[in-house]
Amino acid sequence: MHLPAALDDYTGGQRRQDVSAVTLGDGMRALNRRMPGIAFRILDETDSLREHIRIWVDGQEQADLSVKVSPEAEVHVMLALSGG
Amino acid sequence: MAQSKYKHRPAPTRKGTVQLLVGSRKGAFRIKSDAARKTWKVASTWFLGNVVHHIVEDPRRKNYLLCAARTGHLGPTIFRSEDGGKNWKEASKPPAFAPASEGLLQRTVNHTFWLTPGHPDEMGCWYAGTSPQGLFRSRDGGRTWKPVKGLNSHPDLDLWTGGEKDGTPDGPKLHSILVDPRDARHLYVGMSGGGVFESLDTGRSWKPLNQGCSMDFSPGDLDYGHDPHCMCMAPTDPDRLWQQNHCGVYAMDREEGKWDRVGDNMPKKIGDIGFGVIVHPKDADCAFVFPMDGSGVWPRTSPNGEPAVYRTTDRGASWKRLDKGFPKQDAYWSVKRQCMAHDGHDPLGVYLGNTGGEVWGSVNGGRSWRNVASHLPHIYSVEVSGVHP
């Protein structure tokens, strides 16, 4: 998973994080176990993406957390060109 | 009202240096004075780039701060500091709505707008009000937050709040969470929109408290759906409430249960529209408001570009314009609902933050004003460290 600089307080600047997951949602939960609180900055309480955040899985934009991801998947969490 | 073991006494007169806690669209700031309150400087900058709606020090525990923040992209959270802002930790469970009850809209927290320390009998208890309208409580000093189900899951909540069209420009919100100092179970909240609501059982049940309030944006005469902008409780008489509403300035003596539009006694050319209201810590009849232009398309700026505070000392029967020191013309700023505060000193220090990133202060009860800080971002809140009405 590739995370934006805005989340450096959680990642300590390690913007690439390797997690094991079957789905995108699993990946977010794994990330949150490692860095408590990070998921709620990206997703709301209904597990929907925050308004100005976008996620790509292997180059395909995804908003559905149930989408399956391969063991080698590259997930990019990006800040949209809005929201500042 | 049942009495708690806590004997209510208004806070003693404060003295010495004053610290202002300022929330803004781009971060939080601490502004410190000298002991005479003559010179001021920005002493701390926190969470630069974050939208900080409210930052409050716990009056029960020195140097314990809570800060409600989000960024333009990242979701809302609450930070706390136990050492006066040197170090901050994030809530492990920030305010978040539970799955909606059947028939109710599913809400998601956009931001935490308001923070209120709980009753002195309940150390560690805090309340938070969110946008959209939600009430949350922490029992552990802000580490974890739970919805107050009696309000957030009330079957009439959607009816009371009126849906998305009744929000303010920054989103509908719950604010002005007031805890009766004589009884921790007795709470008031304001909802924009929705109105003022009261609970006598720590939030398990709620009743509207809007009788007497105008509602000129609705053709009906309802018990709910009003737009209180800000409400406060007199420390010397917790049954005296003050309210700056979308439709005027009001006072209420709780045993009467009806809001009295005392803003009708303000000059007609100024009107009685505004956002904030504060009450004097030693005088329940003395309150301060900052009128804005609520005419036509609602510019929400100082009327005629001439900012002024108005003060009453007779429960709103008359009002005095206090503009000495403010710009005399072309000052088209406004003061949002969390942007007025006092310091509890004698003479009373009164402070306000404006939409132009300035903080103004008066150390003589409002008679004259000085600029305390400039060039900050758009200011969302001003609190005095250790003082919370």
Image: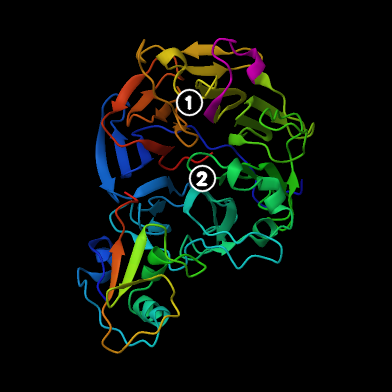
Q: Residue at x 62, y 31 (%)?
A: B243
Q: Residue at x 28, y 54 (%)?
A: B86
Residue B234 visible in the shown view: no
Q: Secondary structure at mark 2?
A: loop
For the residue carrying disc 2, how many other residues have a C-alpha within 10 Å: few (<14), some (14-19), or many (20+)? some
Q: In the image, residue A28 lies at what x, y percent?
A: 38, 76
Residue A42 visible in the shown view: yes
Q: CA distance from mark 1 to mark 2?
A: 16 Å
The segment highlighted magenta reads B263-276
- Residue A79 image-quadrant placement: bottom left
In what quadrant of the picture does the N terminus of chain B appear? top right
List the residue tagged with mark 1. Answer: B300
Q: Nearer the viewer, residue B251 or B245?
A: B245
Q: Secondary structure at mark 1?
A: loop
Earlier along the polypeptide chain: callout 1 or callout 2?
2
Point out the residue furthest to the front here: A60
List the residue tagged with mark 2. Answer: B171
Q: Is residue B178 left or right of residue B41?
A: right
Residue B269 within the segment the image draws in magenta: yes
Q: Nearer the viewer, residue B121 or A10?
A: A10
